[in-house]
Image (tube, helix red, strand yellow):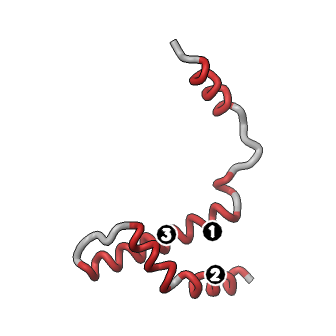
Amino acid sequence: MLSQLENADMKRSETPCSLNLQDSKLFKEFQEEREEILRHKWLESERAGYDIGFERALIDWRLKHRSKWLKARKQNNS
């Protein structure tokens, strides 16, 4: 038997959401940035000869590449 809390969660998840986050501009930008970080992680891991991990790749990419990526992205969207 489902608890009242589980029942409430099920009803809430069945309710249609008026805001679909996956269609939002912010979410799409997040996804594109994440893909760039994952690409950087792969390249740097290949160079190092081991998996450098997401956190290290994130920090490295943000310090070295994010500002250029944002500038290029802004120019492409204009």
Q: Position of residue 67 (x, y in %)?
A: 59, 85
Residue 73 numbered mark, or none:
2
The numbered mark, 2 or 1, whose residue comes first in the sequence reads: 1
Going by the image, does 8 lie left or right of 41? right
Residue sitting at 48 percent across and 86 percent down?
Answer: 64
Q: In what element is the residue under mark 3?
A: helix
Furthest toward the top, the residue is 1
Residue sitting at 64 percent across and 33 percent down?
Answer: 13
Task: Check disc 1 and report the residue beneath it.
Answer: 29
The disc labelled 1 sits on which kind of residue?
A: Glu
Furthest toward the right, the residue is 18
Task: Check disc 3 and report the residue beneath it.
Answer: 35
Residue sitting at 62 percent across and 86 percent down?
Answer: 72
Q: How many marks?
A: 3
CB atoms of marks 1 and 3 within 8 Å:
no
Q: Who is closer to the viewer here, 61 or 22? A: 61
Q: Who is closer to the viewer here, 9 or 14? A: 9
Q: Position of residue 65 (x, y in %)?
A: 51, 84
